[in-house]
Image (cartoon, coloured by chain):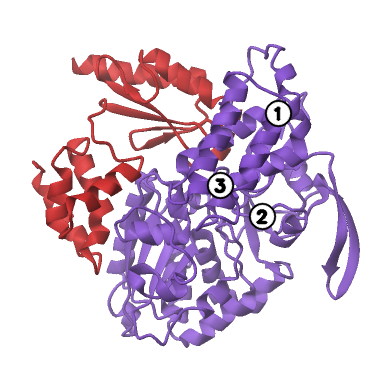
Amino acid sequence: MSAPAQTRIIFQHIDEPGYTNDLACYVRHGGYEVLKSAVKRKPEELIDEVKKSGLRGRGGAGFPCGVKWGLVDRKSGKPIYLIVNADESEPGTFKDRYIIHQDPHQLIEGTMISCFANNVKQAYIYIRGEMPHGARILEQAIAEARAAGFVGPNLLGTGYSCELFVHRGAGAYICGEETGLIESLEGKRANPRIKPPYFPAVLGLYQCPTIVNNVETLCHVKYIAQHGGAAFSQIGTPGNTGTRIFCVSGLVQRPGYYEFPAGKITLGQLLYDVCGGPLPGRKFKAVIPGGSSAKILRFGERFKGKRKVGAELVDYDWGVEDVPMDFDSLGMIGTMGGSGGVIVMDDSVNMVEALANINAFYAHESCGQCTPCREGSLWMKRITTRMVHGTARAEDAALLQGVADQIPGRTICAFGEACSWPTQSFMAKFGDEFRAYPETKKTPKPADAAPLI
Amino acid sequence: MNLQPATLQRIDEVITHYPEKRSATLPLLHLIQEDVGHLPADTETWVAAKLGLQPINVYEVVTFYPMFRRQPIGRRHIKVCRTLSCALLGGYKTCETFEQEFNTKAGHTSPDGEVTVEFVECLASCGTAPVVLIDDDLHEKVDCAKAKQLSAQIKAEAARRR
């Protein structure tokens, strides 16, 4: 079965010749009309549309956006803040970069609609430090929008006011975690907060109710405000509504970004039909489907079980190629849809070296607050690096497993899971390769092989 | 602290973006670093006084975030992405090429003080791997040949200035 056509909602104008990132171009394409009609509606109505839409957060966890908004404490009398999480830094993910650089007003419009719906008094876009041009583009776009009355005091003459500022990060991955992000925006180290009690919806920025939404999520809100929650929920599959942007990278013919209705395309269709399959003379070996912390899948493994289709329970028996790309299906086979970052590895890749690369990332990015994560991520890096560059021992596999198993569930934030899932899943799927690595190392690598650590 | 008037103006403006001054810590550090090139020794006391904080509050932020530096770097700053998608397509060789071209090691500055090479974590452009950030500009699909070409450009500019 060949892949369905792309449905470009969020990426409609990305890479379109002649489409520029200024206000005039955006307005020519119908920009800010949705905001103009949204501010004439009741805020509760807009929240209801988002609830009806079934929109799930696109940052990684897939938490329903309407539920997140519903949890906001509106009785405390404190101001409500909204933060756009533009700290895109999960390895394998590169969708928000294009929205920010090429279509910033789409994000600003979605943000202002969300602010109006939630009676937000002040909003920030937290953009990662490594995107200096992106920050300048957003600042310029906000200035244009402010001058036109789409941002700032007395928005479009409604009496509602909301400011929007850009805040730059400075190279720390942990700022993508929402409570770490809030700490960082408060001018501190980005050490995530413990939940409870610090749920952002109640005790967020400055201990006030705060909404943190991903860039792509807020762009979807604009679509929902325009077409209605019911129309949005018709795209994709029940429980996994709307489109998803898949960012494909690694050893594949045509890496890039592709927007499809959620769950309407399988991993096989995406990798073979859309991305052109493996490089010449190669075979796919493994794929990480939702950012580098998602558990790895091995080509050739099968997944069996029962799943709900409508009201019925039906059997499924999937190979990696057959898995529909949605939160629930990927969750059922023990991994996750995460941020949509699909990293592909072929049979030229040694899994010990690939894991060593990932472990070096997490060891570098642990905030250091919780001992299991700070020490565990470091030891996993040291063991895998030693295996590649020093002496590898057959018992290293068990040692790695032992370290990884002591981290998840014992940390303040989900980084503990994020840093241990790679090791745990590589062991589960490729344990033999780790045990055989002392032998494998005796054969010299081809001269053109890319070092991974 | 010797900052340009335009920087001081931007510093005063950015503080107004936040209901609590402490939030301006990262923006101030960025502005000082952009102006001076690094964060000079009196940064902590200066920012703390500006924002009504203790110097330790600023120091702990400077040491947490990888992008802040307390030492000067070369005139050009080359950041090569190290993480998986780039590594799979040759990121380590790209970094090695820059190291050889400028006779230095990742994390260090070339002997002539011209270029600092760094091997950094994911730059979020995995689809066009390997990627390199030179100062503020992203360069995509930088294989060894393209790394040599970029190096030649940087060297030519340096020669013109001498």
Is residue B16 shown above or below A396?
below
Subunit of mark 1?
A
SS category of the residue bearing label 1: loop
Q: Are there few (<14), some (14-19), or many (20+) residues within 10 Å of tag 3? A: many
Q: Residue at x 16, y 53 (%)?
A: B48
Q: Is residue A178 above or below residue A52?
A: above
For residue A395, which numbered disc appears in the image?
1
Same subunit: marks 3 and 1: yes
Q: Which residue is mark 2?
A: A337
Q: Which marked residue is nearer to the observer: mark 3 or mark 1?
A: 1
The chain letter for the residue carrying disc 3 is A
| Circle nearer the N terminus (3, 1) | 3
Q: Earlier in the sequence, mark 2 or mark 1?
A: 2
Q: In whole angstroms, how far apart are the C-alphas of marks 3 and 2?
A: 12 Å
Mark 2 residue element: loop
Q: Is residue B129 visible?
A: no
Query: At 36% from the left edge and 40% from the top edge, which residue is drawn?
Result: B66
Q: Nearer the viewer, residue A364 or B160?
A: A364
Residue A164, by quadrant, is bottom left
Asked if residue B43 is positioned above or below residue B76 in the image, the reply reads below
Q: Chain of mark 2?
A: A
**What residue sits right under mark 3 in the picture?**
A93
Q: Nearer the viewer, mark 2 or mark 1?
A: 1
